[in-house]
Image (cartoon, rainbow, N blue to C red):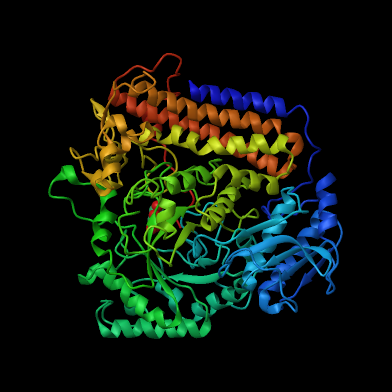
Amino acid sequence: MLARLCCWLLTLFAMFTSLALAPAARAEDGYQAWLRYAHLQGTALQDASAHATALIVMDKGPSAKAAQAELQRGFAGMMGKPLPLATALRDGAIVLATPGASPRPLPASPADLGDEGYAIRTVTMAGKTVTLITANHEIGLLYGAFDLLRLAATGADLAHLDQRSTPKLKLRLLNHWDNLDGTVERGYAGFSIWDWWHLPDWKDPRYSDYARLNASIGINGTVLNNVNAKADSLTAPYIAKAAALASVLRPYGIKVYLSAKWSAPIEIGHLKDADPLDPQVAAWWAAKANEIYAAIPDFGGFLVKANSEGQPGPQDYHRTHADGANMLAAALKPHGGVVIWRAFVYAAGAQKDPRLDDRAKQAYDDFKPLDGQFADNVMVQVKNGAIDFQPREPFHPLFGAMPKTPLMMEFQITKEYLGQSTHLTYLGPLFEETLRSDTMVNGPGSTVAKVIEGKLDNHKLTGMAGIANIGTDRNWSGSTFNQADWYAYGRFAWNPESSAQTVAREWADQTFTTDPRVVAPIVSMMMGSREAAVDYMTPLGLAHLMGTGHHYGPAPWVSDLGRPEWNPAYYHKADAQGIGFDRTMSGSEAIAQYAPPVAKALSSLATTPEREWLWFHHVGWDQKMASGETLWDAMVHHYDHGVAYVAAMQTTWNSLRPSIDQQRFDQTQTYLAIQHREAQWWRDASIAYFQSISKRPLPAGSAAPEHRLDWYKALTFPYAPGRG
Ligand code: BDP
């Protein structure tokens, strides 16, 4: 009911806003993403003209130069006239200075700005009113410059600025799943932007635009290659290529990292084994680290996927993940590098008691016992949920469970399981939901955000990683709205306590227009879009029902794959009685991995949020929901709502045609049509399949699937993108 009301309101809103809109914008191809610096209008233009009369940059280093170039570029675009450089103070000037570079004492900084923070204030210096950006280091000036540009572009009052910002996480990384042959695993935006073949000679100008976009949202590191790594990326020619990229990214505060293949000492070092306790192996890695740092003095470190999905690792030698991570950490330690060790593991081997078999438990089982054993330059990178980037997952039980180990959050920006390139499924709400989840480990308020900020256990090494959605597509991310996920990721990595709605608004202001008649409906569409995808794909806690391998489209019926946990049927466990994975103490006991108050709540249906029911419980088809309807009827209604929401987004978008440039309007319109068709397909195929098991009639008003189940089962997609 609420869902329907929501859709109806969205439609009404759209009709209303279409009545009076700003004139059409000029054609855009999306390359500039949110750094468009569109010409300001009215008071915003006057405001900028009064508070960007000149630019005084006191520092001389590369990041200060980048800040200067960006401010000149941005204000020139927004004001339609150049922002001149100056040396003498004047009213309305923008002044950038670190304390060391300023010839005169700067007004005292309001608080400790740390290594990367900044302050932007309207102050009086030598009798002139200026906008002063200060930071302890030049990189803070660059972040401050981008913030000032964001303020101007979103129509903030530039006359009375008084703000400061410091990142809450130390490492804010993108993980590229890019292969050396140019393909991208789970990439839906073309090929890799890294032109490995022509590097290190040819440095594509795109790299600096990539760096600008990332610096504008505070990203400070990038892992260049796929976690399913090739050892070749650690050979001399590829180190030289990575060094060339590092030289482009360095002024923007972005360090490069590499995914390291565990068996590299064998494959390229010609050693007999890769046992972490073998001194020869340790010596090989130490020499390799020396070689990398000679070429890239500020190299960030190694990301490692070990003993997971066929990748080699220390367990091949009966050593633990900690043995492996610590050996690499020792190699990097003299250079200040870190090891980021992934917790995404699910080992082969069936449980003796099949009732206890549960992939969701395996990372915890492997890693929890190792808490306290990792070296101090190791971080463990944990996916947001315990399975694999599903449209909705409860927070991973490792958050809060390893107090002695700094845990890094891993989100997937590329939408492997959320509609891939075409679906508009804004991820801000997913990030927010996970980060605000309460682990309860130290009592209420022990949110996942606080865990990764190191606040609960006083960790200095903190971080977040996002699997990039960037490729060679002109618009970088495959669609305009996918850019919002990249943007939001950066904002949440800077501040895990951000608000998805604020971030969406800020992004839309910069990406389209600041006109609230356009921005409000866009933000409203975005905010419900991920929930809609949950509804049409995996409602009420279902997960992992996507097509085999490519993960495109529904295939809940698949049950014949080599390993049990590869099969969708393993995850939904639908039978004549009901549906869902029993993870309570009468099932796999996975709930026991959470802190006792959380585990207690999850042990009973009555205290488990309905949206997570089928993740934690096997629920009878006729079980009554809070709304009074049965589980089966509610499931069908969720599918219906998901499809209806997409239809409402189409109506909203169509109403915005006069205010959006043609190219971006057309692609979004077409993609929404694809999304609608695919949402309908998800709904119909899922209902056809689950109805064959539930044997319940559809609730009144819900249409029968368009085709019979066999029709959906027969669909195949051998060339679906993203498999790398
Ligand atoms: C899964 C992807 C697979 C990745 C794996 C990982 O399907 O392509 O290699 O995660 O995170 O979601 O390592």
Q: Answer with left or right where residue 527 lies relative to residue 99.
A: left
In the image, is 636 to the left or to the right of 620?
A: right
Residue 718 visible in rendering: no
| Vertical arrangement, residue 410 with respect to residue 658, above or below | below
492 is higher (above) or lower (below) than 261: above
Viewer-proximal residue among 286 and 472: 286
Q: Report x, y in % for residue 369.
A: 23, 61
Q: Quadrant of ligand 1?
A: bottom left
From the top left corner, tell me how far across and down residue 563 is, in percent.
25, 49
260 with respect to 278 (left or right): right
Residue placed at 37% from the left, 21% from the top?
A: 633
Which residue appears farthest toward the left when viewing the image?
352
Which residue shows up at 40% across the image and 56% down it?
451
Name the residue nearer the viewer: 245 or 371.
371
Image quadrant where residue 212 sits: bottom right
The residue at 21%/44% (across/down) is 589
Q: Residue 179's spot in the image, x, y percent?
A: 47, 64
In this rendering, does residue 262 appear at all? yes
Q: Is residue 587 above or below residue 323?
A: above
Determine which quarter of the picture holds residue 190: bottom right
